[in-house]
Image (cartoon, rainbow, N blue to C red):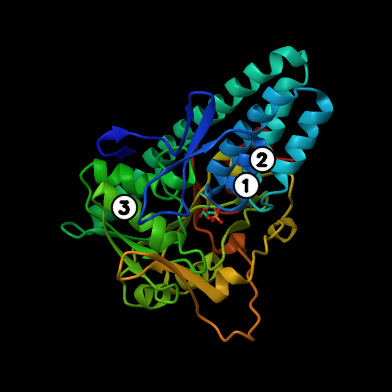
């Protein structure tokens, strides 16, 4: 994507380190953050300086490359991969990327491993960009078809969380079709769920769309059902952190409620899913681990005060406990279809099997 006119990826190699955009500072501050070693990479993933399934995978791959520069022995690499894998449990891309780098390094002599790990991490990033561009091309045709049915009116897309370029290396998953449509001259308007508690929609998706000049409104998480009832949503497109073999979809908490509302109102509900986010080893979404995050993400909120100072305030009574499941699972029956790098398919096992026959169990 363009930042100040410059093509910019969400992760890049910067001299002898890796640089990421510190997403904890957005939307008010855009700053690069350097990862100099594997603990830096683990901290960035755990603290959500980087987030979004594909970007977590890319960062973990570079984390392992950074570890290999220190000690490329089998035991050290296995331990580093364990530490990185433990940072966040739900997005399968994290483990997928680590396994891929380890598999590349295993047959090599330790002296060759650091360079090879670096290459493999770069390849993961390049492939992510290509996959997301393909998702954009395929999703564009869905949006084009909607636009053709409603000439002169914008296509209203509802999305949840941030599955834009910040959640990936570039282009995004759910937002790739939106960017492709806008670039093709199709008028698009996006309803952006704020996505409590971390507000990835309000902070990140809104920032991205604004940078790209795409019309959007941020809405509270509970507004989507009402807008769908009133015919103000043409299509929902969300990302995913892990899809099970039966087509159940883990995504940011609150996605399931949007899928229910979409189903009740006859609004198509699409999941943009690159191949590495599909976990064919898991029979159903019941097997997907759901991350529980800290209670203070619910009890407190950070924002910019009117004097321009970033401020953290408490929302709840001091004595109230809070629970914070970070993801939910949308059953396959509520998913109209998947938008993947291989094309669009129907939701459910048969659809996925048609696109990825070689990966089915
Ligand atoms: O907790 P996060 O911000 O890392 O959440 C992951 C996500 O970005 C979303 O669930 C997204 O929709 C899927 S990743 C493209």
Question: In the picture provided, is 215 more to the left or to the right than 221?
Answer: left
Residues 218 and 75: in front is 75
Which secondary structure lies at badge 2?
helix
Estimate the spatial distance between the alpha carbons at disc 2 and disc 1, rounded to whole Å: 6 Å
Q: Are marks 2 and 1 in contact (CB under 8 Å)?
A: yes
Residue marked by disc 1: 43
194 or 294, which is in the foreground?
A: 294
Q: Residues within 10 Å of mark 1 (few under 14, many from 20)?
A: some
Q: Is residue 218 above or below residue 8?
A: below
Apparent side of residue 81 relative to residue 133 in the rendered image (left or right): right
Residue at image position (63%, 70%) is 324
Q: Mark 3 Cα within 10 Å, few/some/many (few <14, many 20+)?
A: many
Q: CA distance from mark 3 to mark 2?
A: 32 Å
Mark 1 secondary-structure assignment: helix
Q: Residue at x 77, y 13 (%)?
A: 109
Q: Which residue is mark 3?
A: 209
């Amino acid at each position: 994507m363009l930042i100040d006119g410059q093509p910019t990826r969400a992760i890049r190699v910067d001299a002898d380190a890796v640089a990421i955009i510190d997403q904890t500072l957005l939307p008010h501050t855009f700053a690069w953050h350097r990862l100099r070693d594997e603990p830096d990479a683990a901290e960035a993933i755990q603290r959500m300086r980087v987030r979004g399934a594909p970007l977590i995978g890319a960062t973990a791959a570079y984390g392992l490359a950074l570890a290999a520069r220190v000690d490329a022995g089998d035991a050290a690499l296995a331990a580093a991969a364990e530490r990185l894998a433990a940072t966040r449990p739900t997005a399968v891309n994290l483990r997928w990327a680590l396994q891929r780098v380890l598999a590349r390094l295993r047959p090599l002599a330790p002296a060759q491993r650091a360079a090879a790990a670096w290459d493999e991490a770069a390849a993961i990033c390049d492939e992510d960009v290509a996959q997301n561009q393909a998702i954009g091309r395929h999703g564009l045709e869905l949006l084009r078809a909607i636009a053709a049915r409603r000439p002169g009116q914008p296509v209203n897309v509802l999305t949840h969380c941030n599955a834009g370029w910040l959640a990936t290396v570039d282009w995004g998953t759910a937002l790739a079709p939106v960017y492709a449509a806008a670039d093709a001259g199709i008028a698009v308007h996006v309803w952006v769920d704020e996505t409590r508690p971390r507000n990835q929609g309000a902070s990140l998706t809104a920032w991205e769309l604004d940078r790209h000049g795409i019309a959007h409104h941020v809405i509270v998480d509970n507004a989507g059902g009402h807008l769908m009832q009133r015919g103000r949503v043409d299509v929902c497109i969300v990302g995913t952190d892990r899809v099970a073999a039966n087509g159940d979809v883990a995504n940011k908490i609150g996605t399931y409620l949007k899928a229910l509302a979409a189903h009740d109102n006859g609004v198509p509900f699409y999941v943009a899913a690159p191949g590495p986010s599909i976990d064919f080893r898991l029979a159903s979404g019941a097997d997907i681990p759901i991350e529980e995050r800290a209670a203070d993400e619910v009890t407190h909120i950070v924002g910019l005060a009117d004097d321009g100072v970033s401020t953290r305030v408490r929302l709840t009574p001091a004595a109230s406990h809070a629970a914070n499941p970070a993801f939910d699972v949308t059953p396959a029956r509520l998913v109209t279809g998947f938008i993947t790098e291989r094309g669009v398919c129907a939701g459910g096992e048969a659809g996925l099997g048609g696109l990825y026959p070689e990966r089915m169990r």
